[in-house]
Image (tube, rainbow, N blue to C red):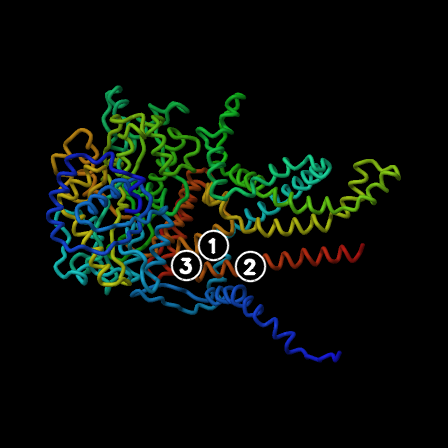
Amino acid sequence: MGIRSVFGKSFAVTTSTAAVLGMGVLAAAAQSQPPINVVINQSPWLEGFASIVEEYEDATGNTVSLDVNPYAGSLEKQRNAVRSDKSEFDLLIVNGIFYPEMYHGGFLEPLKNIDPDFELDPQVYTYGDTPWFDAENKTVNRETGDLLTVPVNPNITLMFYRKDLYDEKGLSAPETFDDLLANAKMFHNPPEMYGIVQRASRGTVSVTWDFFPYINGYGGSFFRDEPNGDFFVTLNSEAGRNALEMYVQLAKEAGPQNTASLTQGDLIQFLATGKAVHAVLPVAAWAQMDDPNKSIVPGKIDFATLPHADGFDSTPALGHWLAGIPKNLDDAQKVAALEFLKWFQKPETQIAYAELGGAPVSAAAYESDFAEKPENRYMLAMRTASPQAKGLWTIPEGAEIAAVMELGLNRAVAGEITVVDALNSMAKDMAKVLADAGYKTGNLPDLK
Amino acid sequence: MTSVQLGWMPKYGSLFPAVVFFLALAVLPVANLIFLSFMDISWSGGVVQREFVGLENYAALGDDPLLKAGIVNTLILVVVATSCQVLLGLALAIACSSLGHSSRLYRTLFILPILIPGIIIGAIWRLMYNFQFGIINQGLDLLGIPAVDWLGSPHLALASVIVVDIWHWTPFSFLLLLAAVEGLPKDVSEAAKVDGATAWQEFRRVSLPLLWPAIFMTFIFRAVIAFKVFDEVFLLTSGGPGTATEVISFTIYQRFFLQDNPGYGSAISVAVIFSVALIIAIALQLQNRREATR
């Protein structure tokens, strides 16, 4: 594997090796496959994925190379690959925000075209049925669509919080945004300790993803009724105002002065260095919290599903990752890539994936005994959060919508414009993007 | 010996390969960019779909908030950074030149920033500007001054990027102007001194006018490069906070690549190419007039 030397196997546990050796008996029956090349992004969950890939190589003798890139770089490489005469990558690890672009563009091979008997393992979570796409109706639809991808990472956001400090005060995990604000302010003691660290820098999709649980948690939404094709923009609703005001208030009253420039890496750094009490992060970041080589607070961070306003549901944001096989490949390469996915989705592989520090996508892992161990406490939060999670959108204009939102949300948190101005301008710009693309759209009257 | 009249054919024919090379490398890509700027490009069924949209992409330029911010910030960066770089470069060039051979160490030191890859410059300055543990804020802390959010404050972020640009590119001005300073005729300066001119008068009345063409060209070269600034912004601020450090190149990157809108991205690119060319042409024209009136 391309990055074997970087990650090594130091944290591979004995049980996982035994489990995977068991799988090796099954895998040995599989034919030897040509090497495959996987394009993937540099994320907190990469280490776990790299380890399970190593196990696949050991179990089957097949070779997998990982082409690791920054988030935007990975997307660009994928676009170039699928639009060329022949893809240089056999497996694309596509983000849950940009997968519609790959689906609508017609770039991915339906997996049943490669192997008519292939089925998604029934224990694998389907994350809003996003692995299926109905090319005729241009919708994500399990009943009428083709299976195009296999989930490889859940990447749901969870509330990371300092359980040791909560215990000292006799508190329990914040359930509402008001609880979160009150608790964050209570612990806020800058510069030694920040009540909460939030991501608000402009990126490809950063603050947009982190804000999504807030607007949904206040009963709002980006669009009026996306599943039924109604893309009327409802961002600048009262719920939107409450959500963004809370996001900004948390930043101002319990966060660092530079919230508007914080990235996901900064949030992890704050928590791991013991300088923050709360952060909303993708689940995969749990491994860094408990690794004593990377964290001074191992065992002190606990995980909970995200807060919500009274009367509304918690709505973690889906930013899951899906593995798809490009159409513009030789058949042998497609088969080799699918062989890896078949192995990857097995229940025993998923348990091993969890044991290796990955973030599995199968109920088999989350309902296993392994999840009950104290060190795997994130998995218990995932059991609750997974069914509540929602995706941001299912249309290929996501990149343009994200650009609008990244700018508006960042400006609001930075104090460059007011919350109301940010919401009104974002709503108008989003409606324009959607109207230009031919959707049924519009936007609410300006908030005052 | 009999002279042979070869005519114009061999003369121009010998230029043909160079012309073809130039067309292939310079003109065709720009022509393709112009062509794309009239298109809306999308993908369906794995096949590219091109739709002619006339001037629609150009009409949209006026409504693009990122582009507006990018133009304003780029102009500020070009004027401020380039002016500072030329002034600093000139001062360093004069200082080094006056030291003669003993300035070799300084010359090497002064050009170091331009030799460092952009990605490393981004890392160096991002660490130095870090709000929590950056060396600049640590220094301020020692002086009892509160930490400053260099990259996260809308009021300071562009200035912080400009400082990095000045640090990075002053050596460029220094190198060009050092050559000019060392090429100044010594006898004119000495004659001025003999006539009783002070050092400042000699510089102001003799050296500066002689250096002016070099200073002007250095400014133009540097301004053109500054107009293309991307890496510093990408690595330090990604255009934020808000649009505080948005620059034109970064807008093009977002529209063209991240948002995958090659038609509109091409329209911005074409507009920028022609605007920069126009500004340079006007500047050169003004300089020529100035030369002609002297």
Q: Amino acid at mark 2?
A: Ile
Which amino acid type corresponds to the residue marked 3 in the rendered image?
A: Asn
Furthest-front residue in this view: B1
Label 1 is found on which chain of the structure? B
Q: Residue at x 44, y 28 (%)?
A: B133
User: Element at badge 1?
Assistant: helix
Q: Position of residue A97 (x, y in %)?
A: 30, 50
Cα separation between marks 2 and 3: 18 Å
Callout 2: chain:
B
Query: Which residue is found at the position 65% from the left and 49% from the top?
Result: B219
Going by the image, does A148 lie left or right of B221? left
Which of the labelled discs sits on residue B252, or is there none?
1
Q: Is residue A296 above or below residue B259?
A: above
The type of residue carrying mark 1 is Ile
In-image side of B168 versus A420 (left or right) = right
Residue corresponding to mark 2: B273
Task: Kindly tell me whether residue A21 is visible in this rendering.
Answer: yes
Considering depth in this image, is B210 or B11 the residue closer to the camera? B11
Query: Which residue is at 11% across, 43% downward?
Result: A22
Which residue is the site of mark 3? B261
Q: Which mark is residue B177?
A: none
Q: Position of residue A327 (x, y in %)?
A: 26, 62
